[in-house]
Image (cartoon, rainbow, N blue to C red):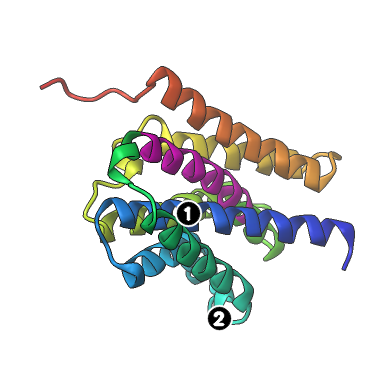
Amino acid sequence: MELAESILLITKLIGTIAFAVSGALVAIDKQFDIFGAMVLGVIAAVGGGVLRDILLGITPPLIFKEYLFVTVAFTTSFFVFWFEYFRTFNKHKTYYLQVINMFDAVGLGVFTVIGVNTALLYGHGDNWFLVVFIGTTTGISGGVMRDVLAGRIPMVLRKQVYALASITGALIFYILYHTELDLIVAMFFSIAVVVLIRLLAMYFKWSLPRVPQ
């Protein structure tokens, strides 16, 4: 395996673990049992990729051919549940909600860029709107599915510049892809932009305009 492929695989695993952790912690916050935590973790981790593949006409979706990512998501969710089982979650609930947001930011950045890269690999490099749409959909869909199943309003509809961060990262990676910049450098730079925007939005409580109550 070439170095670039190895780095890309590691990046996918980081995103998978990050979203699986966020999914499992949301499940724990909602008092789900271990099966519910594992299901929510897996859906958060691979849901965006499944929707991406369907939109790109990749059937069956790649997760049914590459079992590694589902296995990693299940395993991560399993260990997160038991780790928290022996701790007092509610005493540190505010802290854990911050941790969920942190892992969610990493997953958002990674899967946004992975979504863009997949669209480009399948020959859609001349259609910037499609590529950015696929990247954003890949980034946000796992979290949306996680929140809907957990009975929460999806973060993309209420949290600070969530989708905007994904769109920005997707656009940046699409532009950098068409330059002479190394692909891996372009990917990590774009991921960093998404994560940074999300973290700054959380810290400074940035939000898009809403109708006042």
Q: Nearer the viewer, residue 11 or 112?
A: 11
Quadrant in which residue 188 is drawn: top right
Residue 203 image offset from top left, x and y in percent: 44, 21
Type of the residue with mark 2? Phe
Kindly identify which numbered label has been placed on residue 21: 1
Range of residues picked out in magenta: 95-114
Quadrant in which residue 207 is drawn: top left
Residue 200 sits inside the magenta stretch: no
Q: What is the secondary structure assignment of the residue under circle 2?
A: helix
**Residue positioned 46% across, 67% down in the render:** 78
Judge whether 33 appears above or below 179 on screen. Answer: below
Q: Main secondary structure of the magenta part?
A: helix
The crowd level at tag 1 (other Cα within 10 Å; few <14, some 14-19, many 20+) is many
Kindly identify which numbered label has been placed on residue 64: 2
Looking at the image, the residue that sits furthest to the right is: 2
Q: What is the secondary structure assignment of the residue under circle 1?
A: helix
Judge whether 140 appears above or below 38 on screen. Answer: above
Residue 138 appears in the figure: yes
Dot 1 and dot 2 residues touching (CB under 8 Å)? no
Type of the residue with mark 1? Val
